Image (cartoon, coloured by chain):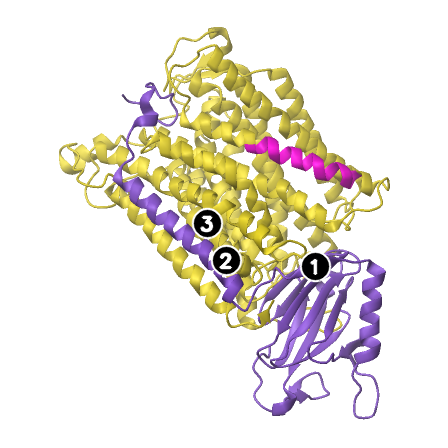
Amino acid sequence: MATAILRNPQDFITCPDTGQNLNKPAISLAKANIFTAIVFLLAGGALGLLVALTRWPAIHILPSELFYIALTGHGAAVLLFWCHFFEVGVAYYFVTSPINARLATPKIAWFSFWLMLIGAAMATVMVLIGQATVMFSAYPPLKAHPLFYVGVILFAVGALIPMFIIIATLIKAKNERTYTGSMPLASFGILIYAIIAIFTWVMGAVIMIPTLLWSMGLIHNMDAQMYRVVFWALAHSTQQMNIVVHITIWYTLAAVLFGARPLNEKVSRMAFVLYLFALQLGSVHHLLSDPGSSFAWRTFNTSYAGYLAVLGSLIHGLTVPGGIELAQRRRGLSHGLFEWLRKAPWANPVFSGFFLSLVLFGFLGGITGVTMSNQQINMIIHNTVYVPGHFHGTVATGTTLAFFAFSYWIVPLLTRHKLAFPGLARMSTYLFGLGMGTFAVFFMAAGHLGVPRRHWDITYADASLPFQFSATVQMLVTVAEIGAVIGGTGALFYLISILGTFMGKTVEKGALPPLAEPAGVVAARLHGGTEPHIKGLEVPGSLVLCLTLLTFLIIYYFAQYKYLATIWGIR
Amino acid sequence: MSYTSMDPIPHRHWWRLPVGPDEKIWIAVAYAWCLVMLVWMVGWFFVGNQNQAGEAFKVTLDGFSNKSDQMIDQYQLKDASGNLMAEGETDVPVVQVPAGGNVYIAAHQFEWPIIPVLELGKTYVFHISSLDVDHGFSLLPIVLNLQLIPGYDYVLRFTPNKTGVYRITCNEYCGLGHHLMAGKLYVIDTAHGVVLDGKGGVKGGEIGGAI
């Protein structure tokens, strides 16, 4: 870690375990944001469990109105509030400690924190008292109470301000020469995140302010399609922010666990730049089965101007495990294709959560996301439970699992408290990954068979023209919900461990013990030496993993088109 | 020099360091696949039979509703004894528009307004829209899904390729009665003897699309 001369040593404390210089205001803000995120995860997770136990056909616990309330609340609490409080918190860390910088304008940062909190609380309360049962997407003409929109706007403005603070902090650090050379990849990733976030939250204001005026009766004409176009520029981009942060976290954890760095800085940074220019175009993925836009416009946007953002993701898919592989091989774990991976610290939740997140995000979220965003394929999955299946592959097993793993490192670092309940922590990543992965796979299968999303009763018991899905479909949904309960158990273990850590006692030293036995020591024990055997390719194992992913993607992609070709002609 | 992704890069020449063979191979293979997807998606628009871009028109809710009512008045089927055909507790009219004609689906909370009857292999011009909030048109078991937006007439030409009873479910949350919105559609093949059985099904010949 960087050991430069500090400009204002009184603003810093030095971590006795890692030697990092931590900027005091940045740590306080990071802790407050991460703690708030966890409270929203608790609330949103509990609502998610109720949703799962209702969609589980044999249990069907909630009546319909409460189900729709719980579903709206679950979406808002985890998709918006959990992810974005967490991201602001870790961003404050990433733009200060690695480059010995002081956070710019901490008072404004606190002001924005309170704005976010008041907004999030207001929106959540309006949902829970049944005044905003409009789902996370809140498509007009469905109308919520004006205070719901006020809450969302306050949250969005509160989330926008930190992005300027992040950029100001980086500029100030550069001017004050708190570091030499180029900024770390981790800080660079957060810079890209901040720029995307500014676009995103401005879009939030652009669409939520007229919607608020409409809900108050001040505007009468609210175009439902215009709302969808601008809303997804907000809501899709919020997910892209999640991705940029969790990829930054992947690189970071590869660094703190293995001393890894990108195979090539230029390539990894260009992959982030591809995100900057192309990722937001993906908001059209939500409009591919809508009326009112041309084939050419859909094609340009849905393909991210020629799959530039997909290319960015595929690059990270190689360079993140590749960085680990190279670091491990250089230290002697270089036998065969996968010794570097087999001998990784699988019992440490920081590693297991990180690597499961990497694999599950690619295989469950990535493959399906790329396929369903091909515009013709979209019409055979649009609005079915395939969609929540897909995005639990991205947001739950990708982003959230990466955040779990990162929490197990960052929370002890920031609080100087030892990780509480390490046994639960160890189980949490596997349970969450396995459970939510199962949920994603089985919901996608049920979606292929037509199960509608956001739906209380797929037996249509009270419908005028009732029908039943087959027993197979009911079984797929049941298995998915069993997965959700297992994943929820993992999330609960995470919450117990991290909340316990927050409430723990401050220790002088040893709050953050070494995460992994050094690869050199492992190699010496296994092979009696640390002489690397690197011939030809540097990272053959990671390349094999990536080519496996690509093979799955190609097969899956053409299987979808094969099915599509069998249905009615549509033109 | 030793540094990680968490440290500043101590030297200035990182931009000029060569890219390794692993990354070069992967970037080339990955982007080649990306281009295949792009060409395939565009190619399908020209040679594939399933494309939902269609065309759309801005309409008024009343205007669209009137079109739908006119269609029902004109084309609602009658049974053997001359009574208008309707199904379900809410008497949803069974409507057969001639091949090539306009089929209006004017969805509203919480009902699909008609039960369309289509002839196998014939093309119909569907006009899909909503009279109140967003709905989702999901045709089962083929799982064809389209978004319904009030004020927009989504025009698509449908050519059914299997006879049988299809179901329509709403798959966009449309309010507290969302789960009540189940509908129905028949595809018959009169030339080969596949016709309505008058009891909510089809009879005769081979039935391909039953749920």
Residue drawn at the location 85% of the way across and 67% of the way down: B66
Residue at image mark 2: B42
Dot 1 and dot 3 within a common chain: no
Q: Colour of chain B?
A: purple
Which quadrant would the N terminus of chain A be assigned to in this image?
top left
Residue A299 got which mark? none
Q: Main secondary structure of the magenta part?
A: helix
- Density class for disc 3 (Cα within 10 Å; few <14, some 14-19, many ≥20) is many
Which residue is nearer to you in this view: A104 or A563? A563
| Residue bounds of the magenta highlight | A196-212
Which residue is nearer to you in this view: A513 or A182? A182
Position of A473 compared to B101: left or right?
left
Residue at image mark 3: A366
Cβ atoms under marks 1 and 2 closer than 8 Å = no
Q: Is A201 contained in the magenta span?
A: yes
CA gap, disc 1 and disc 2 = 20 Å
Q: Indicate the amino acid at tag 1.
A: Ala
Marked residue nearer the N-terminal end (1 or 2):
2
Q: Is residue A403 visible?
A: no
Residue A342 x %, y %: 27, 44
User: Based on the displayed image, in which of its 4 quarters is residue A112 positioned?
Assistant: top right
Which quadrant would the C terminus of chain A be assigned to in this image?
bottom right
Position of A207 compared to A546: left or right?
right
CA gap, disc 1 and disc 3 = 31 Å
Camera-side mark, 1 or 3? 1
Q: Indicate the amino acid at tag 2.
A: Val
Residue at image mark 1: B56
Chain given the colour yellow: A
Q: Indicate the amino acid at tag 3.
A: Gly
Residue drawn at the location 82% of the way across and 92% of the way down: B81
Residue A274 x %, y %: 46, 37
